[in-house]
Each structure stands twice: as structure tokens, then as C-alpha cells.
Image (spheres, grey):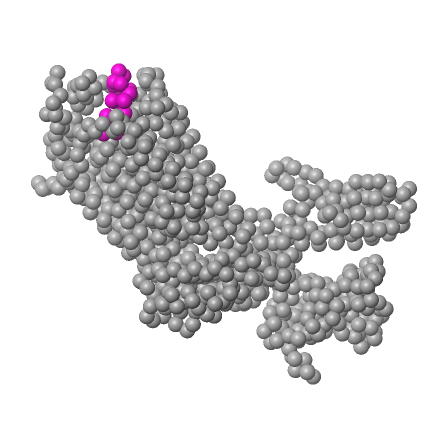
């Protein structure tokens, strides 16, 4: 077994990018994005899907040939069931039809009146178009889903906050949550900007994203803690910078592998999980960004405990530290 | 970190073998698996409705109706109790979700209070140790006694009603010939109905959406509904609307003679003379007796057949009906007669059910989703594998083997615990392929760093695994927390995603720390020398050249 492929060490190491020194640029950029998201959410809002808005979603497919979306739209508009949106999906032979929540009449309750509207749409589709999926969500359920969605995001953030607090110090926990809220907020803002449909699966993506984007942050924090034990006298700003640079390959490469998998979902997945994979993909990018450029500067702002000698986790013995001379050299530069 | 005892190695290999064996059945058709011998595991992953196609209906019960029914029954019970105790009642009525009883003689109020308190029943909750009564009975001014249902009592009634409704819905769905329907309670007042393969839900909704409470009432002998509308209906009587134009409103005694739950059978049939569709029914013993007695004393007078508080017909009794069988006619088509017969046979629902959420997926879309899921899993897997092998060579191959075993484990566990695979669930698996190798990226990058720091290969590998361990646990646990929250939030598909995500995180940690490490150990053993060459390419540290001063 003489031949051994060892892989390619393509990622630059030993970088000493002055990320913390330039923190105002990144924090400024994040603020701009966050404010833009806030403005978008306040003025434009979100394109809620049936899960949160109520009403019905009908996915149709042509048996042969394509679907003339414009013509179908005209036909459905004539039905007198209020706002009907028609959107082409897939390769041109599929479409999504959204029927707004119908107001109950004297004789028909919400359920019956919505069912009647759906029947009208089905009747107007014609011979060549098949119904593949129908989702009808009543107003009670949509209000409930909205509430549970918000509660779930807050609950998982709180759980993560507690965990990071338990494993690190409160400064780390708060910095992690701020970075996380930043990721979630800007991702939601992106959905408003692109007017992508915001449904339950997107909320699931955001929850996953919350758990995942913290991974990179934890990798950086772990290294900061390790370095805090090793270099007791290094100025915090330098120590943070060193830790970020040392873990850069890890932070980026772990995101790359996950992004590759999600990209496959985004490209080859069906319409049902398009929003989900987009949220994940965008979230991975913004999460990696915030782990590098946002979380650590917050630590600088809050300050951290410098004396870790009494810590329960045994610090590695000094002589054991790799490249000891070199690192102290840098530290004393 | 680089030592495995012999038995540990065997245990790890066995776990993989077991995983493969348990995952295999899910790759075969159900029929094929059924023919396998008994000692082969046969548990398969269930496909969710979004993948196999079918209808998902969430029904909500009108709890106000349950309360109203309860109050109606209470009114009858209160009236009877006071009559038995010889206390004269001046008025009895339902206001503000409470029953108000006014006794004619205020001196009787205390005796009446004592009697009515007997209506209350204890409600207990064994688990919470809570106990109380289902009614609150108190005395108000002027000989009025107010009976209010308590929240606990109402909840108890709703729980019972939902259980009864689930049974009724199951019978009705069964009558349609559907075999695989799942009907389960959701929350306190909801029922989830899942029917695989069903695309057209309108008939099913029609069937389960009707209460189908059938009652037989006495018609007021002298006052017509029209007259009663002008004045007030006499005590104990109420105006029931007619079901359609042909059948007018009727003034009926509120307490029915016989109820639908005393029916023994109901069949759709045709009337022998008019050839119209009708429903032929038979009462059970007590029903037949009551009906017989009533018809014997009311020959020549009309009685009303009422369905869901609407009069469907009001025939005149020609003879005493003693055999306990009869027929209902009333503008039925063959279809509606059949439907009503099914509804009557399966019994009345305790309260009306409304569909508040409906998701229907056609089988072809489900098949497309499975295909799309397979394609994205394959391509995502190949992309991730190529990347890992490119970046880490042999250690990358180990990571890919670990990730493959991770997928096998997830499938095996899902089959064993009988969880359901949904489209978001597939997305979760594809996502965890990317996440699975994250642990290996962390380990390998650490090994590289240690190699750059000048460690020997074995020492670098050893340190790499040890140091990366804490980081990996920390980072995976946060995603795990989010997964748990999702499981709690989730309805159907989202829960499927939460399942694969949380399972995937657990197996990821296992494969990264046992499988990948064991493979490294085997590789080291195969070298048969202590002078192992570094398994990873690494650029020597450049920072020394970059202007810093040597000590």
C-alpha cells in the first residue's frame, strides 16, 4: 500500500486577516441588511402561504403540452371567487393556483364556501389539466400555525441560548444569540424582498438554520476559549482575531459540504421544498458570515472572563501546545 | 483515542451489520417483504401521504354544541328530579351557558338546591390528582337556582364526545370500503383523518360532516307551527324547521319519543308503491317498545322524523307499529339515501365536525417527489463525497463511508420505530449527508493543524480526534435542540423532517467517532510500522516567513 492520496490542502492557512479591527465595516453592513429587512417586513410584509394565510393551494399539471398561464389566469378570474393567483412551476407544464380565504355567507360556513370555490376552480381547469395536490387551511388553523411558528423559533433560540450559556459564559451565549437573530432576521427579510412564499416548511428551515448556523459560531467560540487558556496575556482583540483565522478553514468548509447537499435539493427538489431549500441555502451563507464577522465582535463588546485556570475543563499543558513558539511569537508581536 | 478493544471493534461491526439488515426491507415492495421467512426483519419505513398520495383531513368539533346538548339533558334531568321530589317549578331555562331553575314556592328553594346538587358528578383526574364536580350548583335571589357546568366537567364531556366521534367517523369511513384510513385524536377537540390513495374528498367530507342525529317526535296536537310563531311555543315544545320547501316547519315536543341510537339497522331501499328511494329501518328492543306504545296511542295523528334538528317528514300514523320497523321517505336520491343509511348505521356524531385543514396529494405527485428526492440525495451525496475525497484523500473516503453508514442507520431506526417518511423527511436526510461530514471536516482540519504544528502523524490523528470531540458535540447539540422544538411544533410533514434531522444528528456523531475512527485505526494497523506517513497533505506553516522575528 504505497500509494496514498492525501487530499489537497487548498484552503489558505496561517492567515492573519484583521477581521476584528475592521469590525465596524462588517457590523455596519449587518446593520444595513437588518434595517433593510425591518423596513421590508414593515412595509411589504411576507408572502404568506396557505399555512399562514388560510385559503387553498391547488397544484395542477397538464396531461400533455404546457399550460398557458395567462389564459388560465383569465379563465379563473371570471369565476368570481376573489383573488386567484396562478404561478408557473416546474418545466412549464405545472402551475400553482392560490385561492384566497373565502368569506362565509349566510348559508355556507368557511369550510363549505372554500370547498365550493375549489370545485369551481377544478371545474374550470378543463380536460387537459390534472389536479395533483390541494391544500386547504381554515382560518383557525392558519392563525394557530402562525402562533406556533413564532413560538417555535423563539423556543429553539432560547434553548440554544441556555445551552451555549451552560457550555461557555453568558457573553458567549448573548453574542451567539445576537448573531443567530441576525441570520434569522435577514433570511426572513430576504423572503420579503424576493417575495418567495413563506410557509410552514420555511419555518422548519429557519429552525434548522438556527441550530445549524450556531455550529460555526460554536467552532469559533471553542477556539476562543482554548486560546484564552493558552495565551493568558494576549490582548482580547488579537486573541479573537487569531481564533477566527485559525478556525476559518473549518467554518467555511463545514458550510460548503452542507451547502452542496442543500444545493442539490434546491436544484432537483420539487416545488414543495423549493422555499425550504432556498431558506437553508441562504441561511448557511449568512450564518457562516455571521459566525466569522458578527459573533466575535460582540464578544469584544461584552468582554470575556480572562482567567480560565479554575475552569472545570482541564487546559492542555503548555508544552503540549503545537507550534507554541510560533504562536507566542505572534502574540508578542 | 486510537485504541479499540477487540470486543469493541466487534460490537461496532455488528452494529453496522444490524443497521444494514434492518434497513434492507425498506428498499423492497411491501408484497415482496411479506413473503420473506419469519426470521428476516420485515419492518419497513411508512411512506407519508405526501409521498404515497392521499388525503389528510383535520376535523374540529363544535364544542359549543357539546355544551348545549349537556345543558339540554340537564334541563330534563332537573325537571324530572324536582318532579319526583314534588317541588313545583315555575320556570326552567338556559341563559349564559347555565341552567336557571325557578321554584314556584321560595320556601322550597333549599330542598330544590339539595335535590339539584345531586345532579353534579365528581370529575377526577388520576394523573393530576385533581378532583371536583362537573357542575356548580348555587342559590340566587328569589328562589332561583343556577347550575353552571365547570370547565373540568366540560372538558370531560368534550373528551368523551371526541372518543365517541372517532368511533363514529371510523365506522363511516369503513363503510366506504377504505381499509387503510387512520383516524386519531389531535389536541383536545380535533380528529385527524388520513386516507391513503384518496384524491376526491368531497364524498368523504359529506359523509363525516353530518351529525346524523335522528329523532322521532310527537307533533303538537292542536297548535300549528304557524300559530306558534305568532304567539310563543307552549312549554316543552319547539318549532323545528322543515328540511326543504316541501316539508314545512313543525311544532314538536322537544323530548323525542325514540332516538336514532335505538336503531338496530338502516338500509337504503325503494318504496314498493312509489319506487322512490327510502330508508328502511328497524328499532332495537327498547326502541321498538317505545315506538309501539307511542303509535298505539296516537293513531290518526302525525309524528315527525327529525334529522339534525330539521324535519324530513311528518307522516300520519295509520296503525300501531309494533314490529319495530318502518321506513323514512323524504325526497331522497339513491345516493343521499345510501349516505344517510350509512350515517344512521354508524350512529350519530355527538356534535358537528368541521374540516379545518385539508391536504390532498395525488399519487403521481408523490411518486415524482420520491424520484426528485432520490435524485437530489444521489447528486448531493456524490457532490459531498467528491469534495471530501478531494480535500482529505483517504480520510475523506473514511468520512464518506461513515456518512453512508449514517444514512443506513437513519433508515434502519426509522423502520424499527415505525416512523413515517415524508418529503421534508427526505430533505432532512439529504441535509444530514452534508452535516454528517461536518464532523469529519472538523477532525481532519484539526489533524492538519496539528501536523503543521510539527506533531508526528499518529500524535496528530490522536489529538485531532480528542480535541474535535467537544466542538462536535457542542455544535451538533444546538441543531438537536432545534430539531426537538420542531418535533413539538410539527404537524405531519414537518414532524417527518424533525425525525430524520434529530435521528441524523445522533447517528452522525456515532459514525464520525466510531466508524471513521475505527477505519483510521485499521489503516494504521495495516501499516505495520510505527513510522506512519501523514494521512493528510498539509502546507507547512508560512507565518515564520511572513516577517515575524524568530525567538
Question: Where residue A215 sits in the image (x, y, percent)?
Answer: 33, 35
Question: Where residue A199 sits in the image (x, y, percent)?
Answer: 43, 50
**Residue A329 seen anywhere in this rendered image of the structure:** yes
Quarter residue B249 falls in: bottom right
Q: Residue at x 66, y 42 (%)?
A: B152
Quarter residue B339 falls in: bottom right
**Residue B84 seen anywhere in this rendered image of the structure:** no
Q: Residue at x 29, y 32 (%)?
A: A26
Q: Is residue B476 above or below residue A170?
A: below
Question: Where residue A225 sits in the image (x, y, percent)?
Answer: 30, 24
Q: Residue at x 61, y 76 (%)?
A: B333
- In-image side of B209 versus B373 (left or right): right
Question: Where residue B222 sits in the image (x, y, percent)?
Answer: 86, 68
Q: Is residue B139 magenta?
A: no
Quarter residue A253 falls in: top left
State the residue in front, A52 or A261.
A52
Quadrant of the snapshot with the C terminus of chain B: top left
| Magenta span dominant secondary structure | helix
In the image, farthest residue toward the left: A2
Q: Which residues are magenta?
A: A229-245
Quadrant of the snapshot with the N terminus of chain B: top left
Q: Is residue A242 magenta?
A: yes
State the residue in front, B503 or B491.
B491
Q: How many marks?
A: 0
Q: Residue at x 9, y 42 (%)?
A: A3
Amino acid at each position: 500500500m504505497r500509494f496514498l492520496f492525501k487530499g489537497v490542502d487548498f484552503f489558505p492557512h496561517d492567515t492573519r486577516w484583521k477581521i476584528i479591527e475592521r469590525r465596524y465595516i462588517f457590523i455596519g453592513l449587518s446593520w444595513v441588511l437588518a434595517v433593510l429587512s425591518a423596513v421590508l417586513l414593515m412595509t411589504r410584509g411576507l408572502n404568506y402561504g396557505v399555512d399562514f394565510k388560510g385559503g387553498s393551494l391547488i397544484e395542477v399539471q397538464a396531461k400533455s403540452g404546457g399550460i398557458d398561464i395567462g389564459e388560465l389566469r383569465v379563465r379563473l378570474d371570471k369565476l368570481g371567487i376573489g383573488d386567484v393567483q396562478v404561478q408557473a412551476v416546474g418545466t412549464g407544464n405545472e402551475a400553482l393556483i392560490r385561492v384566497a380565504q373565502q368569506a362565509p355567507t349566510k348559508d355556507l360556513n368557511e369550510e363549505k364556501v372554500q370547498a365550493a370555490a375549489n370545485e369551481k376552480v377544478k371545474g374550470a381547469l378543463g380536460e387537459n389539466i390534472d389536479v395533483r395536490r390541494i391544500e386547504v387551511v381554515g382560518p383557525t388553523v392558519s392563525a394557530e400555525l402562525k402562533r406556533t411558528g413564532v413560538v417555535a423559533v423563539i423556543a429553539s433560540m432560547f434553548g440554544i441560548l441556555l445551552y451555549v450559556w451552560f457550555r461557555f459564559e453568558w457573553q458567549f451565549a448573548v453574542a451567539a444569540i445576537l448573531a443567530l437573530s441576525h441570520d434569522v432576521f435577514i433570511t426572513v427579510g430576504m423572503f420579503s424582498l424576493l417575495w418567495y412564499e413563506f410557509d410552514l416548511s420555511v419555518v422548519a428551515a429557519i429552525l434548522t438554520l438556527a441550530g445549524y448556523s450556531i455550529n460555526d459560531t460554536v467552532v469559533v467560540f471553542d477556539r476562543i476559549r482554548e486560546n484564552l487558556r493558552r495565551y493568558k496575556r494576549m490582548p482580547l482583540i488579537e486573541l479573537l482575531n487569531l481564533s477566527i483565522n485559525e478556525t476559518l478553514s473549518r467554518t467555511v468548509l463545514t458550510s460548503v459540504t452542507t451547502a452542496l447537499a442543500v444545493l442539490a435539493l434546491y436544484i432537483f427538489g420539487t416545488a414543495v421544498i423549493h422555499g425550504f431549500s432556498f431558506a437553508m441555502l441562504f441561511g448557511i451563507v449568512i450564518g457562516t458570515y455571521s459566525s466569522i464577522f458578527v459573533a466575535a465582535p460582540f464578544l469584544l463588546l461584552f468582554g470575556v472572563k480572562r482567567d480560565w485556570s479554575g475552569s472545570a475543563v482541564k487546559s492542555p499543558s503548555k508544552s503540549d501546545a503545537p507550534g507554541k513558539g510560533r504562536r507566542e511569537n505572534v502574540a508578542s508581536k | 483515542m486510537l485504541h479499540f478493544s477487540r470486543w469493541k471493534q466487534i460490537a461496532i461491526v455488528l452494529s453496522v451489520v444490524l443497521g444494514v439488515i434492518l434497513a434492507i426491507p425498506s428498499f423492497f415492495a411491501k408484497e415482496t417483504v411479506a413473503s420473506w421467512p419469519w426470521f428476516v426483519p420485515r419492518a419497513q419505513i411508512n411512506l407519508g401521504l405526501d409521498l404515497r398520495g392521499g388525503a389528510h383531513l383535520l376535523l374540529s368539533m363544535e364544542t359549543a354544541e357539546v355544551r348545549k346538548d349537556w345543558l339540554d339533558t340537564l334541563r330534563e334531568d332537573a325537571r324530572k328530579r324536582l318532579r319526583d321530589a314534588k317541588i313545583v317549578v315555575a320556570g326552567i331555562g338556559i341563559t349564559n351557558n347555565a341552567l336557571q331553575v325557578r321554584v314556584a314556592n321560595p320556601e322550597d328553594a333549599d330542598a330544590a338546591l339539595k335535590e339539584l346538587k345531586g345532579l353534579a358528578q365528581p370529575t377526577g383526574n388520576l394523573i393530576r390528582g385533581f378532583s371536583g364536580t362537573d357542575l356548580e350548583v348555587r342559590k340566587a335571589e328569589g328562589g332561583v337556582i343556577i347550575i353552571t357546568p365547570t370547565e373540568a366537567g366540560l372538558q370531560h364531556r368534550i373528551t368523551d364526545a371526541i372518543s365517541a366521534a372517532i368511533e363514529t367517523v371510523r365506522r363511516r369511513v369503513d363503510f366506504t370500503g377504505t381499509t387503510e384510513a387512520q383516524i386519531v385524536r389531535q389536541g383536545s377537540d380535533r380528529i385527524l383523518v388520513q386516507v391513503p390513495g384518496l384524491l376526491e374528498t368531497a364524498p368523504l367530507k359529506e359523509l363525516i360532516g353530518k351529525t346524523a342525529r335522528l329523532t322521532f317526535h310527537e307533533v303538537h296536537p292542536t297548535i300549528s307551527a304557524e300559530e306558534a310563531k305568532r304567539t310563543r311555543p307552549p312549554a316543552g315544545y319547539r318549532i323545528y324547521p322543515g328540511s326543504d320547501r316541501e316539508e314545512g316547519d313543525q311544532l314538536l315536543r322537544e323530548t323525542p319519543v325514540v332516538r336514532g341510537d335505538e336503531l338496530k339497522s338502516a338500509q337504503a331501499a325503494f318504496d314498493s308503491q312509489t319506487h322512490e328511494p327510502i330508508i328502511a329501518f328497524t328499532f332495537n328492543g327498547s326502541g321498538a317498545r317505545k315506538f309501539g306504545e307511542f303509535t298505539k296511542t296516537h293513531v290518526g295523528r302525525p309524528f315527525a322524523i327529525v334529522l339534525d334538528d330539521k324535519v324530513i317528514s311528518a307522516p300520519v300514523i295509520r296503525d300501531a307499529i309494533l314490529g319495530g320497523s318502518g321506513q323514512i321517505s323524504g325526497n331522497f336520491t339513491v345516493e343521499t339515501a345510501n349516505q344517510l343509511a350509512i350515517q344512521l348505521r354508524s350512529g350519530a356524531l355527538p356534535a358537528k365536525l368541521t374540516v379545518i385543514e385539508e391536504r390532498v396529494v395525488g399519487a403521481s405527485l408523490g411518486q415524482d417527489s420520491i424520484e426528485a428526492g432520490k435524485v437530489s440525495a444521489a447528486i448531493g451525496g456524490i457532490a459531498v463525497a467528491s469534495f471530501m475525497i478531494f480535500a482529505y484523500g483517504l480520510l475523506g473516503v473514511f468520512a464518506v463511508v461513515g456518512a453512508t453508514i449514517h444514512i443506513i442507520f437513519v433508515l434502519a431506526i426509522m423502520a424499527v420505530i415505525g416512523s413515517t417518511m415524508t418529503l421534508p423527511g427526505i430533505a432532512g436526510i439529504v441535509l444530514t449527508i452534508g452535516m454528517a461530514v461536518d464532523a469529519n471536516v472538523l477532525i481532519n482540519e484539526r489533524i492538519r493543524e496539528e501536523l503543521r504544528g510539527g506533531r508526528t502523524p499518529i500524535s496528530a490523528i490522536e489529538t485531532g480526534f480528542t480535541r474535535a470531540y467537544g466542538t462536535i458535540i457542542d455544535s451538533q447539540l444546538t441543531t438537536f435542540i432545534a430539531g426537538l422544538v420542531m418535533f413539538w411544533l410539527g404537524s405531519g410533514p414537518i414532524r417527518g423532517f424533525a425525525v430524520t434531522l434529530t435521528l441524523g444528528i445522533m447517528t452522525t456523531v456515532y459514525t464520525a467517532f466510531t466508524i471513521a475512527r475505527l477505519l483510521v485505526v485499521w489503516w494504521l494497523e495495516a501499516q505495520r510500522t510505527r513510522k506512519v506517513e501523514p494521512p493528510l497533505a498539509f502546507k507547512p506553516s508560512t507565518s515564520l516567513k511572513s516577517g515575524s522575528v524568530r525567538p
